[in-house]
Amino acid sequence: MTQTLDETRSRLATVTQLLDEHHVVVLGDDAPARAQFGQMLAEHLRTMPDTLVTVLPGEDAPNLDAFCRLLEAARDADGPVPREIPSLIRFLRASPSPRKHQYIIWRDADVLLESDIRLFGRVVNALLATAACLEHIDPDVLVLQRVVFLGGDKLGAYAEEPHGQFNAWRTDDEEDLWEVYACLDRPPVLTFRLDG
């Protein structure tokens, strides 16, 4: 289904507005259209002042090692992030720049979901919890970090799962994030469909 330029602009404006307060799961059945939307969203967000946009090509991240390598490359890390969730959380909490708005666009996030659903939940929890820390907990910084997850039907099914990490905090990981869990009852995540 081909979208007009006006429809695409309207979708970009809607998702950008949702990102003011929420992380967004963007769903679409057409993989090329989804990829194009992700690229256009990244370009649109980069035009905003005081903004850093990180794009993670999820098709290349079926495991934690690959995910961390993508993040290191995208964020110009000084060294490797140890391949464990607590180290990933520490890396994410260390603000990569003084920019007030930071966006992570995770294309094909369902690749990791299909590969390892438990690990996917742990990575999502790390991303959303550290964003909450940067916004609500860390006294030295006020960074609005939002994540856009792009995927298909399996990601949509996970987004509806009441105990999945788009709807509930994970409290059994090695890193204690009780401050976040006390501050926010649940992750602020909304779902947006590109095709209907």
Image (cartoon, rainbow, N blue to C red):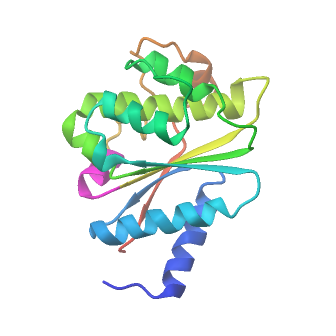
135, 43: nearer the viewer:
43
Q: Residue at x 55, y 43 (%)?
A: 188
Q: Is residue 128 above or below residue 52?
A: above
Q: Is-magenta flag for residue 63? A: no
Which corner quadrant holds the N terminus? bottom left
150, 79: nearer the viewer:
79
Residue 164 place in picture, x, y as percent: 35, 36
Query: Is residue 48 shown left or right of residue 66?
Result: right
70, 104: nearer the viewer:
70
Q: Is residue 136 visible?
A: yes
Q: Is-magenta flag for residue 156? A: yes
Q: Residue at x 54, y 60 (%)?
A: 42
Query: Is residue 41 shown left or right of residue 144?
Result: left
Query: Is residue 182 shown left or right of residue 149?
Result: right
Q: Is residue 163 visible?
A: no
Q: Is residue 4 above or below residue 20?
A: below
Instruction: Report the magenta stretch's main SS.
Output: helix
The segment highlighted magenta reads 151-159
Which corner quadrant holds the C terminus? bottom left
Picture quarter containing residue 12?
A: bottom right
Query: Is residue 162 shown left or right of residue 111?
Result: right
- Residue lying furthest right: 140
Q: Is residue 70 above or below residue 26?
A: above
Residue 113 place in picture, x, y as percent: 26, 40
Q: Residue at x 37, y 64 (%)?
A: 35
